[in-house]
Image: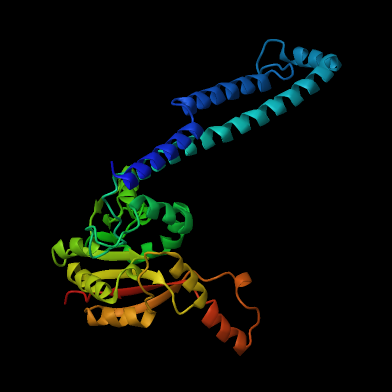
Amino acid sequence: MDRPTDLKRVLAEEIRAAIAETAPAPGASDAAGGATAAGRASLSRAAEVLTPSVPSGAPLEPAKRLVIRALRFLWRNQSAFNSLALEASSGLADALDRLHRAVEELSRRKGIEEARLSLLESGGRVVATPGSTTTAPSAAPSIPPGVYALFEERFRGSPAEIARGQRSYLDLLRDLPGPVLDVGCGRGEFLQMLAAEGIPASGVESNPVSVEAARSGGLAVEEADALALLGGRAAGKLGAVVAFQVVEHWPPEGIFRFLQLARRALAPGGVLVAETINVDSLSALKAFYLDPTHVRPVPPEALRFLAEVAGFTEPRIEYRSPLPAADRLAGSDDDARKLNALLFAPQDYALIARVPAAP
């Protein structure tokens, strides 16, 4: 047996065993949820009988209420005890609710880790960086898909954070002459927002772990090379092509080829949105070099020039993700403004360009 392969399998089995030890037993989440619901029902009934009461409309209602008020001193201490016990029980029920949610999250993450370990064990597949020009194994080893998916999960942000940053693009993508193609769609955060707005869209992604996550949410995502897929699309049928944090993964010739293919695939009046790291801001370069699959920085003016040459009109640069004031230099004089523009400018920018409308 090949020793490196054997060691890899042993390591994967040990990791899987460790995950299994910390994961809840099958059915534990459902049992916890049922127990919590039953406890809540008991607490509700206890609250209803904490002190004697007379239902509205009961026979001799006024006389009964008078008797209860007259004899209230008999159960005053018991009532206080009951109230404190009920409050404590309610706190325990809240804790059980939190535990139930934690168990569900742990179960979800266990499934994700199992999928990633399976990909790591397979050994033969390599991850193509978003929109890469090849998905075939090469002489140089590549980062496995599961490892890169873990990297994105840790450093790119949660799905909710990514969705917040991309929501403002929705206004550019309404009333288009065709569907939207999300290039390098990842886990599908933007596709989910488009679906919620009733905007037809699909995605292409080269990482099989991300593709599985997107498809599990009911999204239309193809596992393919972005340039090959764009090249195979019929001309003039798409309403928009969007690529968030993708072009920095390509060499210059790959970026220009992407722009040419997008221009060809877009219908008249279609729009291109390409977001990437703003390398004119020195503080943003940390994020650029953090990702080991980035090829080279893409200056805003260079990307706009390539879009013009590829045939787009009205290309403009929109700066995004400004740093909070606490992270920039204080002061309003010229020196502070110049230093902020050089060191602490917005962290991202988007190229927004259009295809000329039909005459």
Residue 304 in the image, given as x and y percentages of width and height: 32, 80
Q: Nearer the viewer, residue 34 or 132?
A: 132
Position of the N terminus by quadrant: top left
Residue 257 in the image, given as x and y percentages of width and height: 22, 73
Q: Give the left or right position of residue 49, taking residue 226 as reference.
A: right
Residue at the far top: name it.
59
Q: Nearer the viewer, residue 37 or 11?
A: 11
Residue beneath the point at 62% across and 33% down: 95
What kind of colouring is applied to the model shown?
Answer: rainbow
Residue beneath the point at 69% across and 18% down: 49
Position of the C terminus by quadrant: bottom left
Residue 349 drawn above or below residue 117: below
Can residue 33 be seen in this snapshot? yes
Residue 311 in the image, given as x and y percentages of width and height: 21, 79
State the count of labels. 0
Name which quarter of the figure residue 84 lies in.
Answer: top right
Q: Nearer the viewer, residue 120 or 35?
A: 120
Residue beneath the point at 30% across and 70% down: 250
Residue beneath the point at 47% across and 54% down: 154
Residue at the far bottom: name it.
334
Can residue 119 be seen in this snapshot? no
Q: Give the left or right position of residue 154, taking residue 4 as reference.
A: right
Q: Give the left or right position of residue 253, taking residue 56 as reference.
A: left
Residue 185 in the image, given as x and y percentages of width and height: 32, 57
